[in-house]
Amino acid sequence: MQDKLAENCKKYQKHFSELLDIGCKIVDIPDSAPATMLGEEDMRNFCAHCRLEDKNELATHLYGCHEAHRWNGKYIYYCPLGLTFIAASISGDSGELIGGMVLGPIIMGELQDVLYDIPMPELSWDVSRLSSFSTQKVQHITEIFSAVTSHISGSERQKLQNLMYDQERILKEIYIAKDFYGDGDTQNADLLLQFEKDLRLTVISGEKEPALNMINEMLAHIYVYSNFDFASVKARLLELLVVLSRATIEAGADPGDTFRMSEDFIAQIEKYSDVDQLAFWISDIVRRFVVQAFDLAKVKHSDVVFKITNHIKKNCSEKLSLDSLAREVFLSKSYLSSIFKQETGMSLTAYITKVRVEKSKKMLLEDTIGLAAIAGQCGFKDQSYFTKVFKKETGVSPKRFRNTYFGGFIS
């Protein structure tokens, strides 16, 4: 990230942190080096003191910045501890992601709900001291935060330098690539296909850096094979997007998510009419595919699970289907079921039942609410079914559970 841009980010980092009394982080995502987080010298840096096992703070917030870049510059997400963060992306001149800013952690909604689900009870006191905002206020903060990062995005000079650097590397590869190609179309096509296969296998095998380094060589071969004709280059790049999307899926990325990314990129490619800009853009796309496959999968799973559990808690009185839940987080039903079971150890159906039963327990402690009303407000189709499920989960009927607290009272 350019020095001036970093300075501007740090200035607004302080403003947001002081105004909202929450931490604010800066994520630098350079073109040809690993992502880093710029220093946050503040006691509000909760993440620095978090003792969660296998914590990966950078991966968590890198995920938030990538999702913000994908969703119009802003994104609200959960860390593996279940705390809320807000990310706002910073884009380059050609639309590539060059960094982002992250606010949090914060409590969104009821503190007791967050404390109930926190996997490390010993952090409850620290968590209870975090700033708390309603969902509506979080949305307002997100909009303003995104507007600020859009305003302070990097200078044209730095973006041009990045573009020139990519061009220089591609030109070197073009001189090398010319020696590979003969006069026969079949031979030329075979060479290009071999490079596609090599890139695909590199992505599938999880070789992140080699995959990123191969892209300029791949572009050079596409240029030479297409005789630098823009329409032909664009057609080959569309084919490359298909190869990459399939490879990242085989490497473990979510199919639905990857297909949506690919569709977005195919729509974006139509905006370009210049080969150099197109080359810079496709380099960024390859990085995003590779990062999606290797860096963000685990964090994404945690985020999805917290979003689904929150949705279930808030809507347990409604009819909840796997279809509706999958639509809520833009995933396929099978993939959502798989990662939810992997992260929580239980199926979605079992979790929904657990939430409904827990809510009904609280309501049973109110002696003015009848069993039929409790059944309806907790999402059970009728009182009979409620009684059956409650007894299966707790070992006692709802009436007996209530009698424990109200000495013989029966509704």
Image: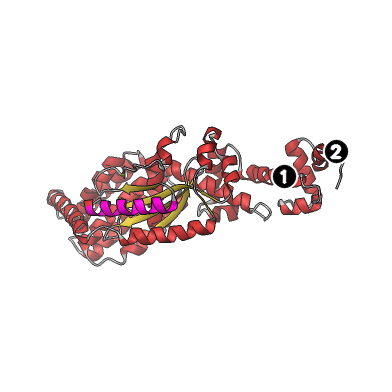
Q: Amino acid at mark 1?
A: Lys
Residue under label 1 = 362
Closer to the camera, 271 or 205?
271
Q: Amino acid at mark 2?
A: Gly
Residue 140 visible, this orientation: yes
Element at label 1? helix
Element at label 2? loop
Q: Whole-percent x and y of residue 63?
A: 40, 47
Q: Is residue 266 left or right of residue 131?
A: left
Compared with 391, 3 (above or below) is below
Q: Whole-percent x and y of residue 143?
A: 43, 61
Closer to the camera, 124 or 116?
124
Query: Would you identify the image quadrant in which residue 33 lies?
Result: top left
Q: Is residue 32 left or right of residue 55?
A: left
Compared with 346, 171 (above or below) is below
Residue 295 visible, this orientation: no
Q: How many marks?
A: 2
Q: Whole-percent x and y of residue 196?
A: 28, 48
Q: Which residues make up the magenta segment?
A: 4-20
Compared with 234, 372 (above or below) is above
Q: Was residue 386 drawn as part of the magenta stretch in this picture?
A: no
Q: Is residue 276 left or right of residue 75?
A: left
- Badge 2: how crowded within 10 Å, few (<14), some, or many (20+)? few
**CA–CA distance in space, label 1 to label 2:** 17 Å
The image's mark for residue 407 is: 2
**Residue at 31%, 41% in the rendered image:** 208
**Residue at 28%, 41% in the rendered image:** 209
Which is more N-terminal, label 2 or label 1?
A: 1
